[in-house]
Image (tube, grey):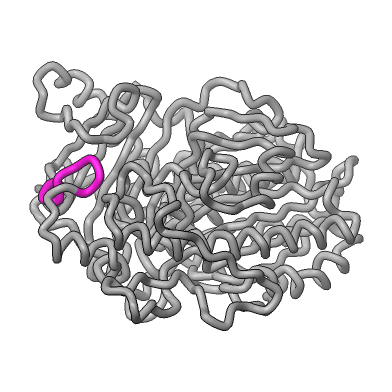
Amino acid sequence: MDLFKNRLIRVLPLSVLAASCSTADEAPAEPRPNIVMIVSDDHGLDDLGCYGNTAIHTPNLDALAAEGIRFTNAYCTSASCSASRSVILTGLYNHANGQYGHEHSFHHFKTFETVRSLPVILTEHGYNTARVGKYHVAPEEVYLFDEVIPGHSRNPFEMAVNSRYFLAESSDSPFFLYFCTSDPHRGGGVVEDDPYRPDRFGNRDDGYEGIEEMIFDPDEVEVPWYLPDTPATRAELAQYYQSVARMDQGIGKLFEILKEEGLWDNTVIMYLSDNGIAFHGAKTNLYDPAMRLPFIVKMAEGKNNGAVTDAMVNWADLTPTILDIAGVLNAELETRRTIAGDTGWSALPLFDRFHGRSFLPVLEDPDTGGFDEIFASHTFHEITMYYPMRVVENREFKLIWNIASGLSYPHASDLWESATWQYVIDSDIQTYGPRQVADYLERPEFELFNMADDPYESVNLAYNPAYAGVLEEMKEKIRLFQEETSDPWIIKWTHE
């Protein structure tokens, strides 16, 4: 039974590749589009106007959605900054690319040196590549861009202005711009006169040049279903909204520059978040608030005109899709086939296969079928937060395998210190969103949810005899997923 292989990129016969692919020395007949990938930091699905939030202010991203295509079922594969970004830029789950957790400080996780990343591949095929803002992956030789544009990652307006020269000078070759804000990640100070000191999400009393800071009333924010509705939560959401609004302004400036330079029509723009918002129940988890994220794509010439798709895609699909848009996916697959040599594709090292697949057909036709299942893999956030989880989710069911069940669920340092969580501790609140606090901290080995009937993931069916058959089927899907993606943690089925 082949439950995962249909998601893997397969190499075409060399005779077909030779006829269909282009190389750096053989330019495609049609001009290739420019590509801008915008990655925000800890931005949730519920927190854009175009996704239904009437209290927040995101006119520029809402306008992008009105011109492009908006995904309602797009997922990260690991709800942690470095790990997620490594998947975005390689098309490989982080259990295979080596970026098991955070790159910075003493965490020190790094991608294997032999991995071929998106910017390197695009450079090889004639794209000018540049990055600006948050990076958070390593080593640099794996994730090498032609240029590093300066700019404060908390001031996306400055990032956009500083990117103009790169955009303007790329008229002779297509470009790839990786534009990554640190908004709306937690950090940047506290409000001392508030009893629960909400983290300011990068907001400063003196503001940022070029940004008109927006202040939100805690009484008017929309508390998402997975958070407790408390004064502390509302205070933090108001600060978070301010950070989102700042990010949207900077993105709007980037859009303005693209139009002024005559680049808008032939530029593909993708907007996404690395993982869910930095609150318990979202970030570092693999519940849907952590995984299911905003994703908007404007194709060249704006052909989608506000379309919406429910195709299920994840961040492992991004690199193969971008290479497909650039017209070089088959050429890259041929390169990887050459690396394999006489041993054949099946014998390629674990980091030489893409784990995702191109969803370009969905961008051409939002109603394209066959995108009905996703997988996820999380192992670390901070070095002290070992808690591996593997997930399969489809239109009806979702299974989470908590490989480290028996250990208490670990807290990210910024989430533990947050006003929202400290309020829960101080008030001895027993529930957190749809689940008991105790159930959040101590998790069973398997969590099975009927997503069609229980989208809040509140009723675990894994130990209900009526769902024993479903449980076994979903467990087998995870096991085969691990086998196909060379997951070291596959040994946990028999080892412990």
- Residue 482 image position (x, y, % from top left): 32, 41
Left or right: residue 269 compared with residue 108: right
Along the line of sight, which residue is nearer the eye, 27 or 230?
Answer: 230
Left or right? Give the position of 60 relative to 286: right
Q: Does the magenta stretch include residue 430?
A: no
Residue 448, picture quadrant: top left
Left or right of 81 on screen, residue 438: left
- From the top left corner, tell me how far across and down residue 125 is, in percent: 76, 55
The correct choice, above or below, for 175 with respect to 163 in the image is: above
Tell me which residue sits at (82%, 62%) in the image: 257
Q: Residue at x 36, y 58 (%)?
A: 234
* Residue at image coords 86%, 59%: 173
Residue 394: horizontal and vertical position, in percent?
Answer: 38, 27
The quarter in which the N terminus is drawn is top left
From this view, report whether residue 116 is shown above or below residue 9: below
- Image point (20%, 25%), residue name: 472
Image: magenta residue range: 432-439
Q: Magenta stretch containing residue 438, yes or no?
A: yes
